[in-house]
Amino acid sequence: MSDLRYLRELDDAQLEAFVGVAAAAFAVDVDAARAWIDAAGRELVRAVSLDGRVVGGLLFIPMGQCFGGRSVPMLGLAGVCVAMDQRRRGVAQRMLRATLDEARERGLALSTLYASNHKLYGSVGYAPAGSRFLARLDPSAVDPRLSSGPLRAASAQDYPVVEALYGAAAARTPGFLDRGGYIWPRVRETRRGLTAHGLLLLDEDSGEPCGYVYVRLRSEGEWQVLEITDAVAADAATWRRVWGAVNSVGTMVRRIEWSSAPHDPLYLALEHARAELRLHENWMLRVVDARGALEARGYASALSLSIDVELHDDGRDAERLHLEVSAGGARCSTSSASVAPSVRLDARGLAALYSGFAAPALLRQRGLLEGGDAAADEALGALFAGPAPWMREAF
Ligand SMILES: CC(C)(COP(=O)(O)OP(=O)(O)OC[C@H]1O[C@@H](n2cnc3c(N)ncnc32)[C@H](O)[C@@H]1OP(=O)(O)O)[C@@H](O)C(=O)NCCC(=O)NCCS
């Protein structure tokens, strides 16, 4: 395996070989796998080759993720796959480490993914750090009197205003993606042959957009399933109007589905909490560059404190970090040699802490945080506390 090579650019034959590996891994036909890669863009493909043969690959998707009100540069990974005859030999592990090196080089401080195998990603420093729930609702549970108020169809010309509304929502929601060109089409364009229809909700006085909803309808027998692929509203009244809009397009609908969370304002806007909410999956996060990540996110502006942490990361030399937080931001430097670190933190512990998913007590139980005292735990808990991180989409 010494000649396993990481490929940042693939020629046509290598790309086709990756398409074949991906089609087999994700149980789709080769044309569907090719269409997926074409839509993503070949520049996102990374692969590994062994003796000149492509034996695995993935999609390298730079974007951002919001924590503490700021977007932190993040690498999304999707489509991680290894040829069936090359599995359980460490190919994926080595490919992921090379990918993380590239992410670090490009200043992507975090990496996030949905994992089919937590052991694999845990072995290279990822940890469960946020959730995606699936909501299902019988449309008869939505109050039929809810009105959408004034609205119009959202077209491609409205993308900037949609992105501004989403951006404001993302900034107040830990875990929300700062979406790029890979994610946006998935929520508001045609996907797998189904068109997403966008409706812009307009302020009753000014006529300015104050929210939106995108839906996709698919047939199920004689009836339809309505998927809400994205929705944003500026306030509680507008969230109720989102449901009014969904009602108005849902006369053939027997089920409504969307990605959600127990504290999703779309879910909370339902007068009767009759939606069935099921945890679909915890997504995983890795802190790729601890200093960069700690300095890029925001913190509660009321906090002013400092802490010294010894970070243990996937077999690298321990890193001693001095973190100083004030005025909503952080400075991170190397701890002075004379200062004993308050705590020892595993990279996976840092990931779960960073997103606000896990408190220090849980990390101690899981063996990801050691040393220090109650005061250190209190400080770490306060720094990263926030509503449970989640996101609206899978990728
Ligand atoms: C997941 C996948 C990429 C792993 O590739 P791989 O090269 O076989 O993985 P590695 O050999 O690097 O595995 C490293 C560790 O991950 C874990 N792991 C990997 N595959 C596993 C499996 N099928 N079952 C249980 N653990 C597994 C093990 O801990 C393994 O270490 P070990 O073999 O010493 O026990 C490959 O199985 C695949 O392509 N699967 C289909 C598509 C898929 O699930 N992609 C991931 C989407 S997020």
Image: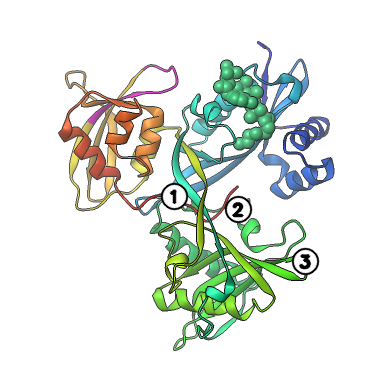
Relative vertical location of residue 189 with respect to residue 28 in this rendering, above or below: below
Q: Amino acid at mark 3?
A: Gly
| Numbered label attached to residue 221 | 3
User: Label 1 sits on what residue type?
Assistant: Gly
> Is residue 345 shown left or right of residue 234?
left
Q: Residues within 10 Å of mark 3 (few under 14, many from 20)?
A: few
Q: Kindly report the distance in space between the C-alpha atoms of the residues bearing marks 1 and 2.
A: 14 Å
Does the segment drawn in magenta span residue 311?
yes
Circle number at residue 183:
2
Q: Residue at x 73, y 71 (%)?
A: 223
- The front one of 97 and 8 is 97
**Where residue 71 appears, x then y in whole percent?**
43, 50
Marked residue nearer the N-terminal end (1 or 3): 1
Which amino acid is tagged 2?
Ile
Q: How many marks?
A: 3
| Residue found farthest to the bottom | 205
Q: Which residues are magenta?
A: 308-317
Which element type, helix, strand or loop, lies under badge 2? loop
Q: Secondary structure at mark 3?
A: loop
**The N terminus is located in which quarter?**
top right
Indicate which disc, 2 or 3, sits on the residue closer to the N terminus.
Answer: 2
Residue placed under numbered mark 1 in the picture: 175
Q: Nearer the viewer, mark 1 or mark 2?
A: 1
Q: In which quadrant of the rendered view does residue 384 lie?
A: top left
Task: Look at the image and tell me whether residue 94 can be seen.
Answer: no
Whole-number angstrom distance, CA of label 1 to CA of label 3: 36 Å
